[in-house]
Image (cartoon, rainbow, N blue to C red):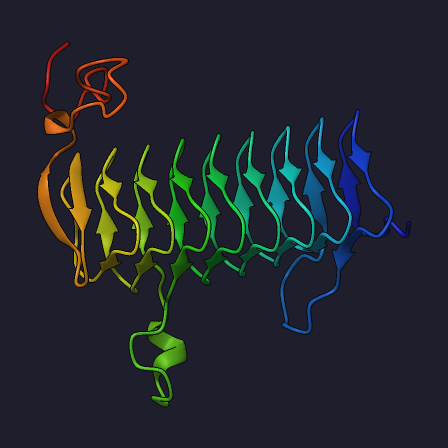
Amino acid sequence: MDLKDVILGKDAQIDEGVKLGYRTGRKIADHTLRIGDGACIRYGTVIYGGSTIGDKLATGHNVTIREENQIGDGFNVWNCTTIDYGCKIGSNVKIHCNCYVAQFTVIEDNAFMAPGVTIANDIHPGCEFSGKCMRGPHIEEGVEIGVNVTIIPFVRIGAHSVIGSGAVVTKDIPPGSVVVGNPGRVICSIHELKCQSGLTERPYAHVLLHGEEG
């Protein structure tokens, strides 16, 4: 494997058929790819030069991570997911299979995305100025996003919110909200949810939202 312009930490497990440091056609200041210790990168993954990724990266198969991304420790990303360029992703973020994360998206620590999530960043595709105002959503800490959710540009999803399967998020969501439907609407707080399996009464009782006391 050609590791030119790649700085790879120790104890990495890299499958055959992986491409690290793929050179983008965009003009960027630094084409160096930096990956921390303990990475596990599986067959078919392509990671472009120009990104910085922390320790304990784990990819599934056929993952693409574009250039100019800043990604924290413990990033898990599963099969056939694409992280487009210019994103900021925190630590301990988990993104499941067949997801698309558009350019300039912000995802804070401990967020989770189920399979099939699509994140958009272009509010007016085809407009001659769209490239100048392109921006993905901001997903705050601990947000959990269900299967096949769509999130449109510019919105902010508050910390520890839960977005139900198939929802389309079109506006800002307060912290600790439960959102369902198209367009997505808040139906309750996470503290009002009840455990369906009977293992506990309130599955999010441990979560303290801003301003709450333990």
Residue 1 in view (yes/no): yes
Is 109 on the left-hand or right-hand side of 214?
right
Q: Residue 71, position in %: x, y? A: 53, 41
Is 214 on the left-hand or right-hand side of 41?
left
Residue 210 in view (yes/no): no
**Does 79 appear above or below 151?**
above
Q: Residue 54, position in %: x, y? A: 60, 34
Q: Residue 112, position in %: x, y? A: 40, 38
Q: Residue furthest top?
A: 214
Residue drawn at (26%, 46%) of the image = 164
Residue drawn at (76%, 31%) of the image = 9
> To which quarter of the image does residue 207 belong?
top left
The quadrant the C terminus occupies is top left
Is 43 on the left-hand or right-hand side of 160?
right
Q: Residue 57, position in %: x, y? A: 63, 35
Q: Residue furthest front?
A: 197
